[in-house]
Every structure is written in structure tokens, then in C-alpha cells.
Image: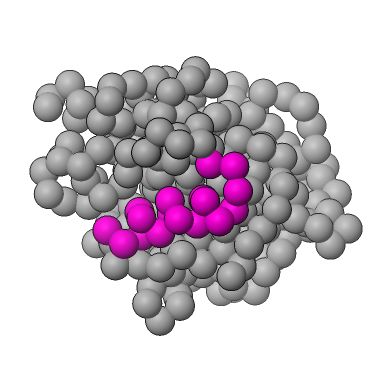
Amino acid sequence: MIRRRAHVAAAAALALAGAVAVGGCGGNGSTSTGGAAIRTPSVSASSTPSTPGDTSTPAGPTSGWGPDVWSDNGGSSMMGGASGSWGPGMMGNGMMGNWWLAGDGNRVQTLDRARNRAAAFADRLGLKVGEIMQFSRNFYAELQTTDGHPATEVLVDPADGAAQIEYGPAMMWNTDYGMHYGSRSTARISAAQARNIAQQWLHGHDSTLTAGDPESYPGYYTLHTMRSGKITGMLSVNSSTGQVWYHTWHGTYIATSRR
């Protein structure tokens, strides 16, 4: 148990490091929100993230399904072991035990199959599945409350159907379903401001992408990135600090189901 807790702490530290690495919004790390200036970390010179449209190695997970949290190694768990990295009971009966659902051994090749796996995960939290997206590296699912409000974000492993809370913002910033659940930081940034921050970040990284409409999650917003009106990926904006986290782990966008 002590060793597993150390693995969880290490994963959290790496996830947080990823946030800092891609948190820059403009050259000096500050973003105007129409009122007070919100300070956000600038890009680390020693850990330059992948920028939209380039071919450099992205910061953070590239596949997400392997014994090393930031590697492309195979397997259904993020850090090895049959129980997975966020398996039930790892940290007692708290939220940690709800972050991971073991796969059933069957490949996930369709949006409907991914929705079924995401629904099995959502049922444990009393949530329902909204939007499902297929990427070359994983399936992404938006989980909603029973009244349709965005609650958290989940990844489904195409290799065996394992499902888990998405790395990055869903794990580190979500105040209801993430690592810091129960915290209540002040939301100082509106949806319109979040979109403006996201657009400034994209522009600051020499990208021709545009920011889509923000979805408001507990503690942050997630937005699609668009090119010529078509989805390419996504990023998130912290609703308290204005920090930007570009989702580098999905791969190429393929399709969406909003059923």
C-alpha cells in the first residue's frame, strides 16, 4: 500500500509539472481578464511543450496506457500491475478508488463501444455520459450530472476498454471529482474570458487554431481547438488562475458522438 501511494504521489507530481510546462499565456505569463490581471506560469525553457501544428515530442502522456505514466509502453494500467494506477481501494474508500475502471479485455473500436465503457465508469459516480470523441490514441468522454451539467472528463483505452479520469485538468483542477475534490477556489474567470485566454494562448504559440465554445467543469473550462471550423483537439483554462493546459495526449481527432 505504501508503495502504491508513492506511485500515486509521483503521478500527481508529474501531472502538475505538465501543467506548469504548458501554462504560459503570452510572453510574460500574464493574461488580461477584463479586470485584474491573472498571473499564469510562463513556459519553462527546459520543458518546452508541443505546440499545435508542430511535430515535436509533446509534454505529458503520449499514449496514457502503460507502466510508465509518460511513456508509450503497452498495457492497460498507467503504472503497471493488474489493478491499474487508480484502482479501487488504493487510497481507502475515498475518491481515489473511483478514478479507474479495469478493462474487460475487448478492444474498443467504435464510439458506441466507448460510450458503453464510459457509462460503466460514470455509473460508479452517479453520472451520465455526454459527448464522446475518438482520437488516434484514445477515446474521450464528457461525464455529466443527472441534470446535464459537465462534471468531469474520462479517457477510454482502445486496447481493452479500461476507463479513467483524464490526466491534466480533470485530475488536477477538478474540485468535485479530481485529486483536490472538496476544494473551493474562487472562480474569477467567465466563459467568455476563458475563450479569450485560450485564443491568446494559441496565438502566442504561433498557431492558426481557434478556440471553440467553453464547457464549464468544476474549477476549469475545456474548449475544443478548431481549424477551418473543424475540431482538432482541446485545451483547458483554470477558472481561478487563467492557467492554460493543452491536451497533448489524444493524438489525431477522428470523430464525435453527441447522442
Question: Is 122 a magenta residue?
Answer: yes
In the rendered image, the residue lying farthest to the right is 228
Span colored in magenta: 108-124
Q: Is residue 153 above or below residue 48?
A: below
Q: Say how many tags the image has.
A: 0
Is 156 situated left or right of 200 in this image?
left
Quarter of the image for the C terminus: give it: bottom right
Residue 244 percent location from the top left of the image: 58, 50
Residue 240 percent location from the top left of the image: 46, 63
Question: Is 253 a magenta residue?
Answer: no
Q: Is residue 68 above or below residue 181?
A: above
In the rendered image, the residue lying farthest to the front is 106
Residue 6 percent location from the top left of the image: 22, 25
Q: Residue at point 52% right, 51% down?
A: 113
Is 5 situated left or right of 10 in this image?
left
Residue 107 percent location from the top left of the image: 51, 36
Front position in the image: 252 or 175: 252
Q: Residue at point 39% right, 20% down?
A: 67
